[in-house]
Amino acid sequence: MVTIILVNRSSDPVAGPQTSSAPPATTTGNPAPSSSRSAPTTRAEPTTTAPGDGGTTVDNAAARLAYRVPAGWRADESSTVEVLGVEFSGSATTGPYNCGGADYSRAFAVSAAVQNSNKQTVDPAKAANSFVTAFAEEFYPQGTVVGAPAVETGQLGGKKSVTLTADVGTKPTKPDCEASGAAISVLAVDLDNATADHPSGVALLVVVRDRAGGPTDPAPVPDPVAAGILASAEVD
């Protein structure tokens, strides 16, 4: 597993959501996962804009990454979640519901930028694999990656990229409320921004969604919706 820390837009290190996984922690009263921590004061706030198709663009300057979500998704500039010591922001969620006195959402997306603390270059594929596993464990009851993730390699904005999509098995303790199956996709892009002091960073976009189980309304998010969010990503 790679050792990683959050980096800001200029590549300077800074110290370091229940969908039928839990949405990212927010400042508006939604329950926070036990691992979440307060955001660093130096973090740049993501910005959101609404394209003409009724969707929303979430621009996370700290991650040097922007992506679009369809109409019906809610972007939240204040939401953060910490996984493997990395603070993810640039959050968007969909399909909120309350079940058994707890708040859930059917899917969420978050983004961050990471680099190795030992000044060695991060391998995007290894980073994506680490975060697929970590998000499964963090946001689903006994969540585990089932089988080998599907891997797509390519380029984004002229930079090397890899996307891993994994099936996630769960053991819900509240079957009426929690997903019995899920999927997690991680897009990792080599930012190609190495300096004399810091290795190149990797931008990450994570899309977590239920596939089965839980309530009939709201229904799980179809895979093509998640694929569209990943395909909309842009880096600078």
Image (cartoon, grey):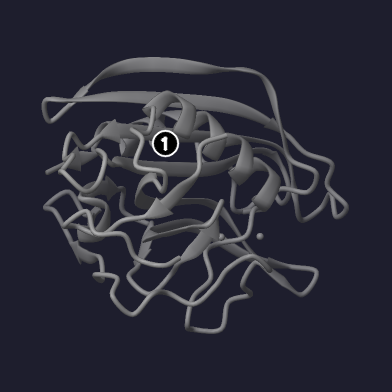
Residue at 49% x, 75% y: name it.
26
Q: Nearer the viewer, residue 129 or 181?
A: 129
Q: Is residue 106 left or right of residue 78?
A: right
Q: Residue 93 vs residue 104: left or right?
A: left
Q: Nearer the viewer, residue 151 or 72?
A: 151
151 relative to 133, above or below: above
Quadrant (top left, top right, bottom left, bottom right) of the C terminus: top left
Does residue 184 appear in the picture of this structure? yes
Say which of 84 and 138 sits in front.
84
The quarter of the image holding the N terminus is: top right
Give the residue at x 17% y 48%. Answer: 53
Vertical comparison of 166 with 61: above or below:
above
Q: Element type at marker 1?
A: helix
Left or right: 196, with 233 as reference point: left
Which amino acid type corresponds to the residue marked 1 in the rendered image? Ala
Residue drawn where x is 51% and y is 41% of the image:
221
Q: Position of residue 3 (x, y in %)?
A: 50, 43
Q: Say which residue label 1 marks.
A: 226
On screen, residue 134 versus residue 156, left or right, reads: right
Q: Quadrant of residue 199?
A: top left
Question: For the point 52% across and 64% down, which residue is it?
Answer: 24
